[in-house]
Amino acid sequence: MTTNRVWRTLSAFNSSIRRWAPLPLKNTQRQVRQVPKPLTITSWNVDALSSRPVARARHILSHILEGQRSSDIIFLQEVNLDVRASILNDPRVRSAFLTTDAEDQTAFAGVPFATMTLLSSARFASSLDSQEEGETEGGEKLELGRVFRVILPSKYGRDGLCVEIVLPTATDRVLRLINVHLDSLWDTLPYRAQQLEMLADVLHEPGCSGGIIAGDFNAVTAEDQELLEKNGLVDAWLALHGWGNLDAATWGVGVGRRDGRGPRRLDKVAMVGLEACKMEVLRPGVIELPIPKGESINSPWSDHCGLRCTFTI
């Protein structure tokens, strides 16, 4: 299946000029002798539609970045323009991450929110970095390739944000990291089926040795649960925990709903050619939100939980 793509770039914060600068790519023949240590990805739908999205997103980002469990790869969904600005202005992001969508606001045109991907500059490098700059404690940095958005059939203007990683043992092959927010609600199952088929095809293209599709799959129906296996994708959570784990839900957790809908596993990590070795659900904390009459209530950072998954190449 042919896919249409919008080519994008990764950016690093340049402290000398005080702005984000795109990282151009050039062909290299760098050979990495070591397969790097495992990588950790965290994916989180930050909930653009509830009150105080910037404050809530800051709490989520702090939860991901702080302590000894920071992630090498961060996938964020439902990022609106204000949240995007907050992320790009965050000193922790500027000092330690490469990011998509810093060059312009193209991905946010005509939609209320979009996806963003952050990559640790301690683990990843553009192909312009020198061999010496690429050395890290656990081996050399992984080299990054192209960045693009896969245009999808969608009721809501959704796409798949893809970043390529050059394989350390074969520089003519890549892995692909695809950040997704598939179409929402029950009536868009046909869209989700097409979207996942197209994205899985991207991982099976010649020259690609697999990768990850992660994010908000909006898997609200029984049919959604079958789409991963149908498209040759491994559900990382099921591979590690099976069907019986009671802590699998990522949406509607601990919240009573008027419509009676209970918790669901809407968010997923799907893999091809990689192996998950650890995975957990990250529960949101609470933030104080003002309500009329000068009072306040405690509300979760997001209506979604996050997912953290460690995998090996």
Image: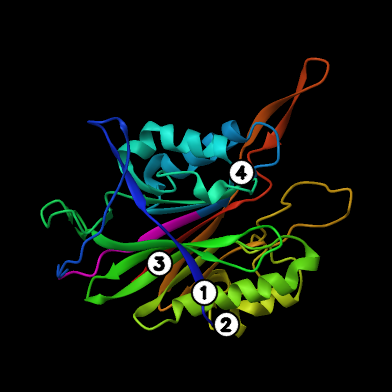
| Residue with the most extreme left position | 132
Task: Report the residue at 82% width, 20% height from top.
Answer: 292
Q: Does the segment drawn in magenta span residue 37?
A: yes
Q: Which residue is mark 3?
A: 311
Label 1 amino acid?
Answer: Thr
Using the image, determine if residue 219 lies above or below residue 115: below
Q: Which residue is mark 1?
A: 3
Q: How many marks?
A: 4
Q: Main secondary structure of the magenta part?
A: loop
On residue 255, the disc is none
Mark 3, Cα crowd under 10 Å, few <14 / some 14-19 / many 20+, is some
Q: Does the segment drawn in magenta span residue 41?
A: yes
Label 4 amino acid?
Answer: Pro
**Is residue 59 visible in the rendered structure shown here?**
no
Circles 3 and 4, Cβ within 8 Å, touching? The answer is no
Q: Which residue is mark 2?
A: 231
Q: Which residues are magenta?
A: 33-42
